[in-house]
Image (cartoon, coloured by chain):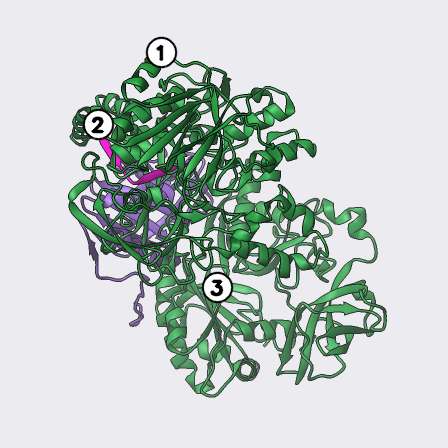
Amino acid sequence: MTGYRLPMGGRVNRQTQLAFRFDGATYAGFEGDTLASALLANGVQLFGRSFKYHRPRGLLGAGSEEPNALISVTRGPGRFTPNLRATSIDLYDGLEASSQNRWPSLKFDLGAINDRLGMFFPAGFYNKTFMWPRSFWEKLYEPAIRRMAGLGHPPTEEDPDHYAATYAHCDVLIIGAGPAGIDAALEAASGNGRVILIDEQDELGGGALSDPALWPWLDRSVKALAASPNVTVLTRTTAFGYFHDNFIGAVERLTDHLADVPHGPREKLWRIRAGEVILAQGAIERPLVFDGNDTPGVMLASAARVFALRFGVAVGRSIALMASHDSGWHDIFALAKTGVGIAAIVDVRDAVSPDLLAQAEALGIPVHLGHSVIGVRGRLGVKAISIARNGGTGVADLACDALLMAGGWTLTVHLWSHSKGTLAWRDDLGAYVPDQPNENVRCVGACAGAWSFGDGAVIDILPTPKDPTRAKAFVDFQNDVTAKDIKLAVREGFRSIEHIKRYTTNGMATDQGKTSNLNGLQIASTALNRPVADIGLTTFRPPYTPQTFGALAGHAKGPLFQPTRKTNIDSWAEENGAVFELVAQWRRARYFPKAGEDMHAAVNRECRMVRSSVGIFDASTLGKIEVVGPDAAEFLNRMYTNPWKALEPGRCRYGLLLKEDGFITDDGVSARLAADRFHLTTTTGGAARVLNMMEDYLQTEWPDLNVWLTSTTEQYAVIALQGPNARKVLEPLVEGIDLSAEAFPHMAVREGTICGIPTRLFRVSFTGELGFEINVPSAYGRALWERIMAEGARFDITPYGTEAMHVLRAEKGFIIVGQDTDGTVTPQDAGLDWAIGKKKPDFVGKRSLARPDIVAPGRKHLVGLLTEDPNVVLEEGAQIVADPNQPVPMTMIGHVTSSYWSEALGRSIAMALVVDGQNRMGQSLFIPMPGQTHVAKVSSMVFYDAEGARLNV
Amino acid sequence: MSEGLTRREPVPAEPVSGRDVIVRAAAPMARYALRARQASDVEKLLGRPVPHKIGDTDQGVLCLGPDEWLLLAPAGTALSAGEGAAVAVTEVSDRNIGIIVEGPRASEVLAAGCPLDFDRFNVGRATRTIFETVEVIIQRAAADRFHVEVWRSFAPWLWTAFATVASE
């Protein structure tokens, strides 16, 4: 079958022929065609297989409401897009498209067995049948169902395309450029405000594109809009969601319609904040519900009109109409005037206006009033229809090759509903219309119910003498929901339309009920014997039509996915072979392997060098907050658990920060630089959280305090120099600071210069060795690092990474918040009672520390663990039990939080949270791990230099 | 003084030219976060008037909040620590990097990731805002020139984002 292109008419450019392929066969179309119109012109009626029953399906609509003709388009490696609507794919030369959900071929699909067995697959079938055994769901049932019932395949390759994004602002945003939207845009354009007009199609006009009488007006209007400097027109752009405060998400498709993929973004995400939104989304014609209404060749009357008048394509050679609404008659008259053969008009109504009858007679079209289509013959395409008088039994067959449905109109209120505008039911339209707005928004044209399509009757299911339980009368074509599925849901007790929707899947997923919602409601209404308005309406959700993940991600892919924060010293680490790890958004050097070293060898060497000579470590990522003002000490005294007011300038203190609930949330060493100035440090990952928390308390609890917080994390590069030779390395470089043990004791801070650069020099240690942390302005971090490396060469100075840092601190029993604590650990649990100011009247979390369950025995305590076999390094996260011989599931009494090989001790060490751990010292516990259960003794957490002799040198 | 220690910046010294827009790094400068309940306390400290209205700027002083100003000054500018006064002076010279976006498409480049309405963002105005997920301070220096302050470690990401949008 070829030759459905009408000899004239339409907006396609017949001078430019385009070649394209569908399911491997080559076809030709014209510039201005969609894939749908081009295939129709070539006589193709079969476009896909349905979701659940694999029934052959053709086009239902001509626009983005199309539920059946879901197509995959491929244009080279990585450029594969499934589930596109054939009616929304602009044709280009070389387009390569294929149908979906069929095997081995579209015409012969083995999955269609589902259709023969359809009576065994009612609504809720999957939920009812695949309940048991539970374990089969994930591995067997779900994958099998997904293979059988499906849409297109997801792409498997990385998307090579670039996606753009922007914010935009306007005074008036008009969504939908049909006649009503264009009129609204022209009116807005005459003012001074900024106007944006959005339409999803390739050209402005909407319904006017299939009404040649309006083309001169359309042409003038488009030119006027283009000439208005305050108007931005976006075609091929879908407003997919309406969010709070007139914030609209829209995606502009920039290259998908082009034969050659150009350099530049494929799509652009528009995030638009509008003063006023005018919705001109139009209306979608409603299908009629009868047996066989999904046969290829059965489609909306309005769609046939669009194909004929906009694209110059006849949907058949002998077309019948099944109507309950006048608009279908007008469409069929328009088709008749293009020369297409009209088989008959069937209308469920007993009477229509004499004017319609006169026009039909003048065009020689047979009319059957008070009749309904009760069956369709033909499986892969319409061959004939059966009609019957309503309430009668006599059946007549009419030959035709296409059947149009005109069931009235459903206003497109999706975006209105996203914006939480209310809806009111209108009996005369048989539709919900926008009522009270929730934003500064109004609807115009058809979507406001302000467009006359003529009169019609609202009918849920066409009358039929046939057994309705054997009918396949579809309501939701995309989700394969029939009228009897909805009736079944009602019979099974569902009353709310929201429940009926979920049970039957009517109106769900990517289709969002564009053609099915109101028919589903009408059927439920009849079955429940309650008016539609009492049953309500399901909730519309974004996106209006499916959008690509690429567009939603925008620029956020590859290097722009999210910032990788690097310190000033990071480049040195990279050049010197560091292996990195991510800590929050920071990239940190984990260890510095030398040739032939694995991680353990490198970490052991790094640890050994810190303990025996000197190590150098990039600590720049530590969070830093400068707390300044007359009330600085008072503020810290209220925030931290320990006392701060008496701390002298020049001294440091370990600070422990709790949340209101009494659990540890952060810690760090902080220094008092002056009476009214503190330099706080936080954990790397906790920096932003701690600043926010402190700012929150300052602003809401103690606004009377004269103190201000400033993040200085990035102001300073911090180099930690740790080990017995640290002072010797530093001495020649520092000016203005006496580094001697007497003048500069442990936990002190001094200001001076290093290599001529101002520094805040801390004498602190997270390793248990003599240590300094050198703060300098960030830009000098790397240069200073290299200078210290040169100076330290005589001591074989060794850069170490976060892994060695973890081992060294664990040897000393220093905790890492977030690793050894998990948000449920109090200072007592962590063995940090000493850090609580017992005499302080209050601090954040103090009251919670006295709660009954916090002081009750049996809490988990942080303790050390020493394995019986010193060579066994326990797995972090491993569970701990008291009795390894108890039946499974065992009673778990804790878990390992930190575990390392300690080079200094020549054995493994671990920290663990264990029930009542502090009272189990010396007790043997058991750690079942894959293959073997290990034995370990509970110990103190301080494994190395318990008396701290190495610090005070 | 720095005995040959050289600064190392996170963004290239070479500008990036896109379609109708240039992205370049600002020279190093002195920056101070200034906090006080009264603008007069800051004025006393600086010995000069400062803007009182949030979003206003005056010769390198940006009023960012009800009690917050940012001073941008030539590199090396020293400032009293304000000890004893009810002010907080914190040096953040190296915390931020300045990126200049200049050209007819400058505001379009910023609008790609910043939700501000740049048609309503007059010359001389400054505010703390975001570019996608990254906090920035944007100051409109001229109709088609913006000065963007960003924390140092976020600067390479922001630079790449600007360069990407500039080339679109």
Q: State which tag comes first along the sequence, 2 or 3.
A: 2
Q: Which residue is mark 2?
A: A212
Label 2: chain letter: A
Does residue A874 lie above or below A497 as drawn?
A: below
Q: Is residue A233 magenta?
A: yes
Instruction: Check disc 2: other Cα within 10 Å, few if <14, some if 14-19, many if 20+.
Output: some
Pinpoint residue B110: horizontal percent, then vertical percent: 29, 45
Residue at left offset 17%, top offset 29%: A219
Residue at left offset 31%, top offset 70%: B5
Instruction: Name the mark nearer the viewer: 2 or 1.
Output: 1
On-image quarter of the C terminus of chain A:
bottom right
Res A491 seen here: yes
Chain drawn green, letter? Answer: A
Residue A61 appears left or right of A506:
left
Q: What is the three-letter code of the residue carrying label 2? A: Pro
Label 1: chain letter: A
Residues under labels 2 and 1: Cα distance? 26 Å
Q: What secondary structure predominates along the stretch shown in magenta? A: strand
Q: Residue furthest left?
A: A15
Q: Which residue is mark 1?
A: A354
Instruction: Name the mark nearer the viewer: 2 or 3.
Output: 2
Does residue B13 lie above or below A342 as drawn?
A: below
Please state the extent of the stretch shown in magenta in the rendering: A231-242
Tell which of A556 and A646 is nearer to you: A556
Pinpoint residue A217: horizontal percent, then vertical percent: 19, 24
Q: Are marks 2 and 3 in contact (CB under 8 Å)?
A: no
Q: Which residue is mark 3?
A: A750
Res B122 seen here: no
Chain drawn purple, letter? Answer: B
